[in-house]
Amino acid sequence: MKTAKLKYRFIPPLIILALLLVTPAVGRATWNISVDGDARYRLTEWEEHDANIHLVSASARKTFSDSRGDRLTLFGLLEAEDNFSDVMLHEVYGQYKGPMGAWNITAGRFGLPWGLLPGFSATRLLYDMPHGAVLGMSVDNGVMLSGVTGAFDYGVSITQGYGPRHTPDEFGHGLGVARIGFTPGDTEEISLGMSAALGKSIRVHARKNDMGMDADMNVMDKDTALHRAVGGLDATLYLGRWLGRLELSAGRVDHRSMTAGFAAIDYALLPRLDLNFAVNHVWHGSKYEDEWFVGVTGKPPWFTIRGGYRYAGHSPSRHEVTLQLYRLFSFNY
Amino acid sequence: MTRIFPEARDYKTVNLRISPAQRKTIEEIVGYGLLPGQQDQFQYFEMNDQKGQVIGTIIPSTQKGEFGAVEFVFGMNTDLVITDLYIQRARERDQSFKDRSFLDLFVGRSIREKMGFDQLYTGDPTPGTTAVITGLVKEMVAFETLVLADANLEAGS
């Protein structure tokens, strides 16, 4: 039985990975290969310190085109976290593109169409976003219809609600997520979005669940899946040297009211130096979690250096100073 | 893309490798070394009509501004004339490079006029305006070297 579950779990991503490697019989194909590395030093509670290879990832994107245009994209993203102790296929999907990208069908494991996620992720930054509390995860397995038409972009997904670490032997109750975005004007200085999510999903995208069970175990059961009915608004604003991002979410999670607010501001102080500020607050029933961040980003040649102080009022480790060395390589063929 | 080519029905991504000899040619023409990340690859989009015929080309460009990258997109029709261009993302102190009055200086200009683009703008140069002009010239030189030169070779053979 376990062998059957294992085979089911890995067949779809293996098919996509195999397709990534095989040259197509028809059409032309272009490749994009990206590799990034994230090394960090942390000082926690002004006493404990550690350093590690926080994350190394490799992604491959292969786009097949026919006589009229790009048609099929296959994408895979492999991530190794915490000194390579946790290796995960974070994203793997196939996307069929309609004319001019007005509609696209994506199947596999992909980023959910919620809030700022389609255009921004904090996974390589030194602060968090509230998607674990709002949706349970930022990446999930399922299908999505998305596209861009004029100044509007949209995405509608139906996914299992397990995230990238749990692949069950049944589809599950499912999570529906949708977003519509609007980018007015000629210079794309402002982008607005409205999102909604309805369904059930696991509690948090984490290596172990709240009971300390390993991620490989199927923990999507009636006791751990949470009902979610939430709405959200998001905005991205470029104002001269300022770059602001805002995401607000509200609704009911696990039959209790939930409100989450995220805001991040970057200011270009010097040509190669940014100041960064971020806040991340979640109210869920009587529980309140807050996170405040202030830091800098330096961009010398060849890599990026980030440093910052994070205060998390809800965490046992309230004070954390982090230094990061980051590098991204990307090639097109 | 539909902003520049509203009549387009689909697009195709084209990625070209830049050989060392081609890079040297491009750098000699533009007069400066190519930015890291642009030294060995060139990307553009073929815009196609319903029948799959190419009706134009869209080229994205990224150039150094004062406070980061200035990203913009421009399109050329089949006569290699700029049909439109617009700024995508930039964080610059002076925002005059986003004005239509500046960008329209280049609309209707042919690829053959590219080396005179710096003469079209008579205002005070800013990092943003310089990035747009430099980017236009560099992308057109690269397109000429990598795409048109190959097409001429194929036509002659």
Image (tube, coloured by chain):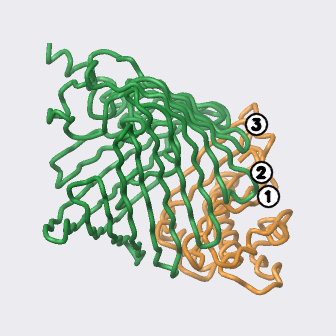
Chain colours: A green, B orange
Residue at numbered disc 2: B4
Name the mark nearer the viewer: 3 or 2.
Answer: 2
Give residue A238's quadrant in the image: bottom right
Density class for disc 3 (Cα within 10 Å; few <14, some 14-19, many ≥20) is some
Q: Are marks 2 and 1 on the same chain?
A: yes
The amino acid beneath tag 1 is Asp
Callout 2 crowding tier (Cα within 10 Å): few <14, some 14–19, many ≥20: many
Q: Is residue A160 above or below residue B2?
A: above
Q: Looking at the picture, how far across and down is residue B48, in whole percent?
A: 72, 40
> Is residue A20 in view?
no
Q: How many marks?
A: 3
The amino acid type, in three-letter code, at marker 3 is Asp
Foreground residue, A330 or A205?
A: A205
Q: Position of residue A75 (x, y in %)?
A: 42, 39
Q: Which residue is mark 3?
A: B49
Answer with mark 3 or mark 2, whichever residue precedes in sequence: 2
Q: Earlier in the sequence, mark 2 or mark 1?
A: 2
**Residue at disc 3, secondary structure:** loop
Q: Residue at x 63, y 58 (%)?
A: B60
Chain designation of label 1: B
Q: Position of residue B94 (x, y in %)?
A: 69, 78
Label 2–label 1 contact, CB within 8 A = yes
Report in which chain the residue with disc 3 lies.
B
